[in-house]
Image (spheres, rainbow, N blue to C red):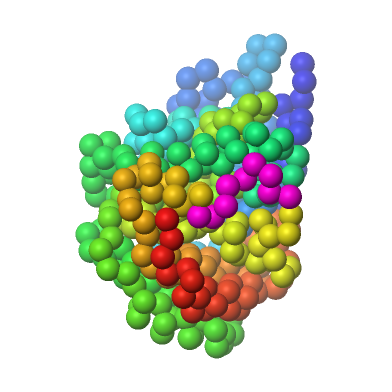
Amino acid sequence: MSSPTAGLPVSAIAPAHRFDIARLGEYLHSRIERFGDDLVVHQFQGGASNPTFLLVTRNGGGFNRYVMRKKPPGVLLPSAHQVDREYRAMKCLSATDVPVPNARLLCKDDSIIGTAFYVMDYVPGRILMDASLPNVAPKHRTTIYDEFNATLAKLHSVDYAAIGLGDFGREGDYIARQLNRFTKQYRAAETERIPEMEELLTALPEHVPGHRRVAIVHGDFKLGNMIIHPTEPRLVAVLDWELATIGDPLADLAFSAFAWHRTTGGKAPLQDVDTSGIPSEHEFVRAYCRRTARDGIEGWNFYLAFGLFRLASIMQGVYRRVLDGTVASNFASVNLAPDLARQALALLADRSLQTIG
């Protein structure tokens, strides 16, 4: 029998995230049919939001694998780390053609492991963190990006009221709500005055586009949150629904296009690398517009800047938790918010990006 953790980026549970494994095992054994015995827990590495764990149980001569997501320890920012929203989004979307893991159980009882958590089935496959897909054949790159694009269009075409998500987001202007929410989160996690963030907080409300559609938005739609089939160029599951709500779908589209824009170490993932088989940003957006019956997109520069603002706010929160010692991953103790804010301001000022599609 091969190891249930072979090839997976897992390790022992970080000290800050430890909990009573025996109590968890008893709880799940009585609530998940054929859960298995002799629970062993490993922690997935990477990410800095909701800690994620691989649960392995013995099942006859084999094993079962599940994934658990829980809230992190410590004082949390308002409306952040909502594992119940992740669970609900996946549970409701399971009735659609948007691929999601099978969500098994949500527990809001803090007495079990110290925080709320949910459990879903483990989905085997590849998570491709590098958007340039360096070890993928060009023809498979084309298929993966097309699946990525098509899945986003499918999500934005779902009748959210019909699947039970009619109250998943408050009524009113999504952009205004998000600007307010992430400004509050940024202020709550603020560790220093960042001039670029102050300028961005003033500029963004002045550039909000006009007519906007409403759909389910994922909130963090990127290749790194997709599971690709182990051997085929096929998307089999969308992960990390923590930021999902009802809102403007173009915020999702812009986030999915960060590979062409967000710079790390001086360049974006799709700059100055072999991109054979990968569509250009214009081709990617045009494919989305075709699938969602749009003629084009106005205010593209705003949506890109808005996405980076949200990310800057999130990373400010991560930096605060790094300083507090509650992030169990390899995040360096460097605040990424200033650089993200500078990038957002540059995109917002780029008139060549006002229209696309």
Q: Identify whether 229 is placed above or below 272.
A: above
Q: Is residue 186 visible?
A: no
Q: Is residue 2 left or right of residue 347?
A: right
Report whether 319 appears left or right of 207. right
Q: Choose between 58 and 230: the one closer to the eye.
A: 230
Residue 275, percent across and down?
68, 49
Is 278 a magenta residue? yes
Q: Looking at the image, which is closer to me, 282 or 238?
A: 282
Q: Is residue 193 visible?
A: yes
Where is residue 347? Give x, y as percent: 52, 73
- Asked if residue 296 lies in the magenta stretch, the reply is no
Q: Residue furthest top?
A: 61
Q: Is residue 17 above or below residue 28?
A: below
Q: Position of residue 175 (x, y in %)?
A: 34, 67
Residue at 59% x, 20% y: name it.
36
The kind of secondary structure the magenta stretch mainly shows is loop
The mark total stands at 0
Q: Magenta stretch: give its range.
A: 274-282
Can you say which quadrant of the picture contains the N terminus? top right
Residue that appears at 36% across and 65% down: 298
Q: In the rendered view of the protein, which quadrant contains the C terminus?
A: bottom left
Residue 335 pos. (x, y %): 65, 74
Residue occupying the point 22% across, 59% down: 171
- Corner quadrant of residue 251: bottom left
Which residue lies at the image location 55% right of the left edge and 33% below the top edge?
235
271, 33: nearer the viewer: 271
Is residue 102 depicted above or below 283 in this figure?
above
* The one of 134 and 22 positioned closer to us in this rendering: 134
